[in-house]
Amino acid sequence: MTSMDELMGLLRIHVKRGINLAVRDVRTSDPYVVVRKGTQRLKTKVINKDINPVWNEDLTLPITDPGEPIKLTVFDYDTFSMDDEMGDAEFDIEAFIQALRMDYADFPDGTILAKVQPGRKNCLAEESVVVLREGKVLQDLCLRLRNVECGEVELQLEWIEVPGCKGVSATPTPTA
């Protein structure tokens, strides 16, 4: 269990939807998403018979080490056998954390605080933007799934401050 002095805050991962996911049953799949960070594991609900599922579900992870990547795996739920993997991806939150450390109180709504380009070292399908919306720092991500023939998952990240924990300004993010 995480102690309050190690905890920086909570990361809300809004799992929006899957796009063109792989077929793992006869003509469709019953997908769900598992998000892992270290020993923590969270899961969305199963969407039956849909390769373009809309989950619109929030998963919340306590964050102690912002440098540790977050892994996402899509599975096809099967009633009578092991669930099939439908691809995986990982993302880091370093640009997001750096944007949170900015003094953005006087910035206008819609200000772009950071941009992350897709590349070999990440699973982004397109540019990811960290933006200030209604006083909240948000990051939209579209992740291209690996180890599968097709599929993407759209997420949105939001930070939740926790009273009594160290917050984002206490620990500098290691630079690569």
Image (tube, rainbow, N blue to C red):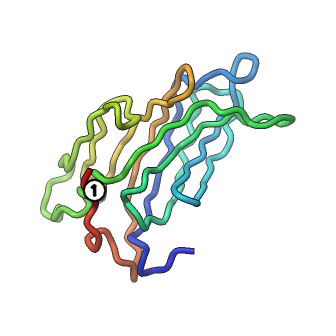
Q: Residue 117 appears at what percent x and percent y?
A: 26, 35
User: Is 164 rendered above or below residue 100?
Assistant: below
- Seen at 50% across and 61% down, the residue is 61
User: Is 54 rendered above or below residue 148?
Assistant: below
Q: Residue 73 appears at what percent x and percent y?
A: 58, 40
Give the farthest residue toward the front.
Answer: 176
Q: Amino acid at mark 1?
A: Glu
Circle 1 is placed at which residue position? 134
Figure quadrant of residue 148: top right
49, 108: nearer the viewer = 49
| Mark 1 element type | loop
User: Is 81 rendered above or below residue 42?
Assistant: above
71, 111: nearer the viewer = 71
Give the farthest residue toward the top.
Answer: 27
The crowd level at tag 1 (other Cα within 10 Å; few <14, some 14-19, many 20+) is few
- Seen at 31% across and 53% down, the residue is 94
Which quadrant is the N terminus positioned in?
Answer: bottom right
